[in-house]
Every structure is written in C-alpha cells, then in structure tokens.
Amino acid sequence: MKASLKVGVSGVRGVIGESFTPQLATSFAQAFGTFVGGGAVVVGRDTRPSGVMIENAVVAGLQSVGCKPILVGIVPTPTLLMLTRDLGANGGIAITASHNPSEWNALKFVDRNGLFLDEAHAQELFDLYHQQDFPLVREEALQQVQRESAPMHRHFQRIVDYVDAAAIRARKFKVAVDCCNGVGALSSANFLRDQLGCEVVTIFDKPSGIFEREPEPVPKNLTRLCETVVKEKCAIGFAQDPDGDRLAIVNENGQPIGEDLTLAFAVWQVLDKHGKGPIAINLSASKAVEDVARARGCEVIRTKIGEINVASAMLKNRCVVGGENNGGVMVSAIHPCRDSFVAMALALELMAHTGKSVSQLRAEIPEYFVERDKLEIRSDQSPEILRMIRREFADRPVNFLDGAFVDFGDAWLHVRRSNTEPVIRVTAEARTAARAKEMTASMYDLIDRALQARHGA
C-alpha cells in the first residue's frame, strides 16, 4: 500500500489520485458488506469534491455483495451515526477525511449501534478485505438504492429536546459560525437560527469542500472567525471541522479559548443541569476538564485516543458526558459520539443559564497551557521512542495505554502515534506556558536521541 494510505481503527484514508482510489473504496465496501452480513447500510459524506466519486464506488461495492445502500447525502458525521441506529441498518459508512486537507478522503465504518468499529472488529474487517473473497450476488439479487429525505431532522430535534431551548431563544444570541466550507455550510446556520433563535453570521459557508482555511479548528486557523466576532459584535464564535463533529469556541473579544474548553463547558453544563455521573475523556484532554468534573464530585475515566474508545468507556461506565481534547463533545442521552451541534447548544445553554459571557465563564475554570505538535516519522521508529521514554521516566508513573503518558501531578506529557496521519503527536500541559514549552522541547530532544540511537544501531 502507498505511504499516504492510513488503515486503522479510524478507518481507511488516503490522498485522492494517489493512494485512495475508487477501486479501493469499492473493495472496502465489499468487505464491509460481507462483515455486516448484507442488509441495509447507511452511506453519507462530507462536502469534498471527491465525495460523489467515492460514494458511487461505495454503493457499487455494497450492492455487489447484496447490501441495500441508504444514501443520506451530505450530512454531519454524528447525523450518520444516529441514523444508522435509528433506521435499524446493519451498519454505516461515513465518507469523510475529517480534519485532513481536501485532497484526502476516507471511509469510516459504523456498526449497527451507530458507533465506529472498535479495534477488534476493525481488524476483522481488514482481514476480510485482504482475503478479497466476497460473496458476490447475481443480478436478480441486487438491492436498489434508497435515499433518505430530511436526514438531519431527528438529530437536531434530539438536541433541542435535550437542552433548554426556550432559555437560549430568549437571549437571542448573535453568533458567528466558521463552517470551513464543510457540512456545516448546509446546516449550522439553520440549526442555530431556526432551532435556537440565534442571529447568525456565517463565514466559509459554501459547501464546496475547498477549504479556505486549514480544516482543523485550532486557534492558529481561526483568524477570520476572530475578526468576524469583533466586527459583528457577536456574543460567541463557533468553528467546525469539515464533517461537523468537532467544535472550537471564540469568546466575545475575538479570542480562541482552545478546544479543550469546548469540552469543559459541555461537562460543566451537563453535570450542573442534566444530571451528575461519571465522565470519560481521552488521555490528551486537559486537566481543566478533569477539574470541572471533580469540583462537582464526579468520577473521571481516562481512555485511549479515538472516539470509539471514549464511547465504549461511556457505555461501560454509564457516563453522562465525555469527549476528546479536539473539541469533540459526547452526550450519552443524545448519542455517544462527537457532535459539534451538541457542543454549540450546550455552550449557549450555559451562557443562557448563568447570564455570563464566554470570557467570564472561561475565567472560572483553572487555567492550563497546552503545547501540541507533531513530527513525521516512519511507523517502525515509534517502538524505540517509547523504549527511550520508559527509560527516561523510570522514576515516574507512565501510562502506556496509548503511546506514553507521563503524569507530573500538575502537568503531563503525552507522546503517541497518530491514528490518522504518518506522524507522532507530542502534547504537553502545565500551569505555565513556559513549562509546557520546556517539556515539549525536552521531548523533541529525547525523540531525536532515540532516532539517532536506532540509526546508530
């Protein structure tokens, strides 16, 4: 397989015209159809220009093994997950490369419960793909394509029924939304305006899939949103990723507060107004989220990176809320999946119930400073890096659940291979920016030493 192709628990993704081809998509769809045993399979996509081509390839693959494709068109990934369960389908396929650049695309595989495949089931699927022994059906057994109308209605109604929509509508918030020319361009303004009574200003709101900013909603990519919030005098700014499962927040002064605080706000509101209980967050989530939960007497469960790992922990431990450090908010009562629309509604509900601005709310949460970066490496280099970390921090508690997580009490360091890119991710968090930078720099030195030792060997 070509170098840009990534196959793992996050599905299969690659560059269009290079590693990710219609033939590949058809074969994986055949494998998935075989894996779920035929029947209905929900298929949705984001706005990328390659989406229609890959959708056609997926439909062909599913039909060839006796599946009935249910097409829901361009929808947020959380919508597809909910529909897979609600429609009683045997599985679903989301055609989206999420935060990757527009030349990438991907298939993400969903089980009958509306959850992404876990590692064991993903491996079973990949084994079927590699065997290439699919139960092809004859012409008379081919299933016709079904198209679902108004696919987002159930999703948005579930959110509106969960939050105090009346309190949000009463405030008539003015909101700026950066849709990244992704799925939000077709749905975010309508959701906020029609369902929650907001005045909405949108940017990057063409469903073209041509991203006019880098698709990850991290602070450095939100300059235009920050300017818009100030210019339009908005109470809050929201930034989505291309498939609508992650959310970043900008305060009323045009300052990004960081994706971790999206999760902290959601945890705060859910635990205060919708019922207390355990929460599940991944290893790279900020201690600020943990502080919010512990201040309310709630247990915090840490998991491996990856939505399915958090979702599984939420179900196992009956968590009321959870999520990931990338702005992925998950509420069990709605659906245990990352959902930017849930995150927007909870942030607005928190503001409505407290009467406070984003900056005032942020000031009530302990402040930590996070440094995140990534380094390109080959997959065979990561074992030596982890061995070096084990030796370097032998006197400290190191969690090897997902890469290496080193806990310093009031700070932590996390090093792990990415599930979606050929990189190793380095994240450090501390009470001061200087210490977070120092920890990151020291880790770079350690990685460099590990790679030199391996090369020397």
Image (tube, rainbow, N blue to C red):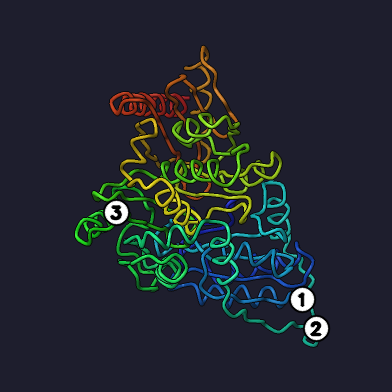
On the rendered image, what quadrant is the N terminus found in? bottom right
**Residue contact at pointers 1 and 2, CB within 8 angstroms:** yes
Q: Which residue is denoted by mark 2 in the rendering?
A: 141
Q: Could you tell me the amino acid type at mark 2?
A: Ala
Q: Position of residue 408 (x, y in %)?
A: 46, 19
Q: Is residue 444 left or right of residue 231?
A: right
Q: Position of residue 395 (x, y in %)?
A: 51, 12
Q: Could you tell me the amino acid type at mark 1?
A: Gly
Q: Give the CA distance from mark 3 to mark 1.
A: 45 Å
Write the residue at 34% across / 60% down.
173
Q: Which residue is denoted by mark 3 in the rendering?
A: 222
Based on the displayed image, in which of its 4 quarters is residue 319 positioned?
top right
Q: Is residue 219 left or right of residue 418?
A: left
- Secondary element under disc 2, as helix, strand or loop, is helix
Q: Give the CA distance from mark 1 to mark 2.
A: 7 Å
Write the residue at 69% across / 45% down.
315
